């Protein structure tokens, strides 16, 4: 079960006796005043939230908000006055000053006391006792009563117990800020290592927004016992900082003025079209607003040389998207276009466009004059059927795929979404927009690997996601490149109109979005790429169109949205994907094993993520650089792209525990948590991609692959001989993928 703790409508009230004079007591006794002699304080008021396995939660709010009280309720130390709590964990530790310790006992005795309270046996505690003492740096004080300890010493011991006994859920209440600077750095590094390499759920209270941004996936904001907001880390932290800057009040948030305000409303623009986009947006009042944009779909008919008149019932029968409307290329009149013996026409399945609860977007669509006057528009009256909250801009003459932006720029006062291309997509726009806002970018591109990078624009970025190079499909591509493609989804700031001037008369000229608006931002540090594995595919050819239809009908499209739990096939690299040559140091030695491209292509169409997890000790040994390793992986991406296959992610461990190599990188010579057979890389991927490890597979050619997969909770397939407890042993990569796919279809 993924939900470890679920609380619903809980409230907790503190009561304390009033200090009363004799006169006041008499007045209360004789009914002159309210009779209660207790002060009541609502520490928590009607809180509902869910804590999920493997996630890191931050709890923020000013002093007196109820943060520590919430942690004590989650741990079971305190019980609410009302509401329900469902707990599905075995061990939990509340790391807070004084909690779980007896001041009369020694530090050594408290190690056993605290460990047993957490649910661990004496044998388990004894196994890590020495490590706990060494890490805490208490020395001889470990045998002295805790009443002689400073607050920093108590914190260090509690922290040391928590990270060595590793409970299923770790609750941290401000202890990272206790102790000297050296120990703060040490404890922070340990927490980061736990979050990265262990499948532990963490809920932390801290006033440090930098810690929240660095470590947390999800943020809970409390104020005076009330839940003000919960959701994506960057979004809630930005909202909290806006509040602390005095730009918005709690009362305004409660009245939903923040959601309704003109300044914070997103603007949705479609220039060239796209297709199904369904997204759930969560805002400050924690209500869920759902928007479904369904427009028109493009169909392809072979060997037709003139327009076809279709009856409504024929359109419905031929549409695979019943009760869906899919955006087509609205700037081109496919109704009259003939290309290579194929006539494309627009079919309208205009059944369902639903806005629930609130209006979040103004929508602007640009249409060519020819499309507006085409027979399909006249017959099905598409413009009249669209609700009035959408607006259309009609191009009287062709303005390219971005010229209309300059016609609309006076309406674009804030960051806006720009969606284009003949694509079908289902993505978490909330994360996409938050990524953009958190970096204060002028433009952010939605990027992903695809099955045809050879005829797509490739984006080259640095480790921070800043776009450094943009290779158009016409450019020379000698060399190897990461399969990172611009998907045609963008978040853009109106600042772009000030920074980029494609010409003097922008209001009447053709403007190319990529070449004249976005590419000029390359290398400026103002354009970022947002990498995602979510489903975005163009339908620009008959073959791709048919693939999209199958994947839509099978549920793959919606399943790939990262709000949903994913499943993955983790792949070893050397000996599994490429031919084994020992320690691979020379890029020329990298060669795909026969059948691997076809196997990974099958993974891409199955709904599984294809993720490589590989030990690369050659980095720590100083035999190749990180840059050289990335080039080897770029070659792997390029060769797979030629097979119409792609990897969703590559994780590598650069560490090596043994010392003594000439030129070795000392700081990487450690016993880490990511080197297989440890499961750290798989756990990190599970956190990044919201992966359900119990529904996932590990495929490799060695025992460390199998052990890592089993340690992470995956099912396993061994390519080769040996018995390491794997679920299946096969001879080839193709057999491994075939076995997994057969189980899916049975």
Image: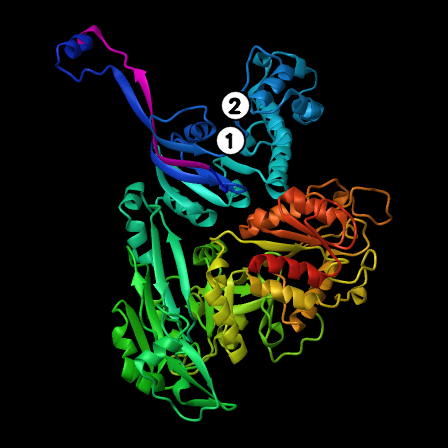
Quadrant in the picture for the C terminus: bottom right
Closer to us: 20 or 2:
2
Q: At numbered mark 2, what does the secondary structure look like: helix, strand or loop? A: loop
Is residue 515 visible in the rendered structure shown here? yes
Q: Which contiguous range is marked in magenta?
A: 5-23
Q: Quadrant of residue 159?
A: top right
Query: Few, some or many C-alpha atoms within 10 Å of disc 2 (few <14, some 14-19, many ≥20)?
Result: many
Which residue appears farthest toward the top when viewing the image?
22
Q: CA distance from mark 2 to mark 1?
A: 9 Å
Q: Residue at x 50, y 41 (%)?
A: 1
- Label disc, if present, on residue 378 of the rendered structure: none
Closer to us: 586 or 277:
277
Q: Position of residue 508 (x, y in %)?
A: 38, 83
Is 200 situated left or right of 13 in this image?
Answer: right
Q: Position of residue 120 (x, y in %)?
A: 60, 25
Q: Is residue 214 magenta?
A: no
Q: Position of residue 560 (x, y in %)?
A: 50, 59
Task: Give the labeled residue for mark 2.
Answer: 97
Closer to us: 494 or 329:
329
Is 559 situated left or right of 256 in this image?
Answer: right
Q: Residue at x 34, y 71 (%)?
A: 364
Which residue appears farthest toward the front when viewing the image?
746
Q: Residue at x 42, y 68 (%)?
A: 418
Task: Give the labeled residue for mark 1.
Answer: 174
Q: Main secondary structure of the magenta part?
A: strand
User: In terms of sequence position, does the residue under pointer 2 or pointer 1 come before the other?
Assistant: 2
Marks 1 and 2: in contact by CB < 8 Å?
Answer: no
């Amino acid at each position: 079960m993924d939900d470890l703790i679920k609380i619903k409508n809980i409230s907790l009230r503190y009561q304390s006796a009033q200090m009363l004079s004799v006169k006041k007591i008499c007045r209360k006794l004789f009914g002159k005043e309210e009779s209660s002699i207790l002060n009541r304080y609502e520490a928590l008021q009607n809180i509902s939230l869910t804590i999920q396995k493997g996630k890191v939660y931050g709890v923020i709010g000013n002093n007196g908000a109820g943060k520590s009280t919430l942690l004590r309720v989650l741990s079971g130390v305190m019980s609410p006055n009302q509401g329900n709590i469902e707990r599905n964990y075995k061990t939990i530790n509340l790391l807070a000053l004084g909690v779980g310790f007896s001041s009369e006992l020694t530090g050594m005795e408290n190690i056993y006391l605290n460990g047993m309270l957490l649910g661990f046996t004496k044998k388990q505690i004894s196994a890590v006792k020495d490590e706990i003492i060494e890490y805490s740096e208490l020395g001889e004080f470990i045998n002295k009563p805790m009443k002689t300890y400073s607050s920093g010493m108590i914190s260090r011991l509690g922290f040391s117990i928590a990270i060595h006994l590793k409970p299923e859920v770790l609750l941290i209440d401000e202890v990272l800020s206790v102790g000297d600077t050296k120990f703060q750095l040490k404890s922070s590094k340990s927490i980061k290592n736990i979050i990265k390499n262990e499948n532990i759920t963490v809920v932390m209270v801290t006033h440090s927004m930098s810690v929240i941004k660095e470590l947390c996936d999800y943020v809970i904001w409390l104020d005076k016992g009330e839940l003000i907001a919960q959701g994506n880390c960057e979004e809630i932290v930005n909202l909290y900082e806006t509040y602390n800057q005095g730009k918005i009040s709690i009362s305004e948030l409660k009245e939903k003025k923040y959601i309704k305000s003109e300044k914070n409303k997103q603007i949705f623009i479609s220039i060239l079209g796209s297709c199904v986009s369904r997204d759930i947006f969560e805002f400050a009042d924690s209500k869920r607003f759902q928007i479904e944009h369904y427009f028109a779909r493009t169909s392809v008919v072979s060997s037709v040389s003139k327009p076809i008149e279709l009856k409504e019932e024929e359109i419905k029968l031929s549409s695979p998207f019943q009760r869906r409307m899919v955006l087509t290329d609205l700037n081109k009149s496919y109704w009259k276009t003939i290309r290579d013996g194929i006539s494309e026409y627009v079919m309208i399945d205009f059944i369902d466009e639903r806005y629930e609860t609130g209006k979040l977007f103004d929508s602007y669509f640009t249409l060519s004059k020819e499309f507006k006057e085409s027979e399909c528009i006249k017959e099905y009256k598409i413009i009249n059927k669209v609700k009035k909250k959408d607006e259309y801009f009609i191009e009287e003459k062709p303005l390219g795929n971005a010229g209309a932006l300059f016609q609309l720029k006076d309406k674009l006062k804030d960051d806006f979404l720009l969606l284009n291309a003949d694509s079908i997509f289902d993505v978490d726009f909330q994360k996409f927009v938050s990524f953009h806002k958190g970096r204060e970018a002028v433009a952010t591109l939605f990027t992903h690997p695809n099955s045809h990078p050879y005829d797509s624009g490739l984006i080259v970025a640095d480790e921070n996601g800043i776009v450094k190079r943009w290779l158009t499909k016409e450019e020379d591509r000698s060399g190897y490149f990461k399969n990172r493609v611009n998907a045609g989804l963008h978040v853009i700031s109106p600042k772009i109109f000030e920074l980029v001037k494609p010409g003097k008369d922008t209001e009447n000229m053709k403007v190319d979005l990529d070449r004249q608006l976005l590419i000029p931002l390359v290398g400026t540090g103002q354009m970022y790429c947002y990498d995602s594995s979510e489903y975005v595919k163009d339908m620009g050819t008959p073959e791709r169109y048919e693939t999209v239809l199958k994947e839509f009908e099978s549920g793959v499209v919606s399943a790939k949205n990262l709000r949903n739990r994913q499943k993955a096939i983790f792949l070893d690299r050397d000996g599994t994907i490429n031919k084994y040559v020992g320690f691979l140091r020379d890029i020329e030695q990298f060669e795909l094993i026969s059948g691997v491209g076809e196997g990974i292509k099958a993974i891409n169409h199955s709904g599984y993520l294809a993720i490589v997890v590989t030990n690369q000790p050659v980095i720590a040994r100083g035999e190749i650089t990180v840059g050289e390793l990335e080039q080897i992986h770029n070659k792997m991406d390029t060769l797979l792209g030629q097979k119409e296959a792609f990897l969703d992610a590559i994780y590598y461990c650069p560490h090596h525990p043994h010392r003594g190599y000439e030129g070795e990188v000392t700081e990487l010579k450690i016993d880490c948590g990511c080197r297989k057979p440890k499961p750290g890389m798989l756990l990190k991927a599970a956190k990044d991609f919201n992966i359900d490890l119990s529904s996932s597979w590990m495929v490799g050619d060695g025992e460390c692959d199998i052990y890592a997969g089993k340690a992470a909770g995956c099912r396993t397939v061994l390519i080769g001989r040996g018995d390491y407890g794997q679920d299946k042993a096969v001879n080839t990569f193709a057999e491994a993928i075939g076995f997994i796919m057969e189980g899916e279809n049975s």
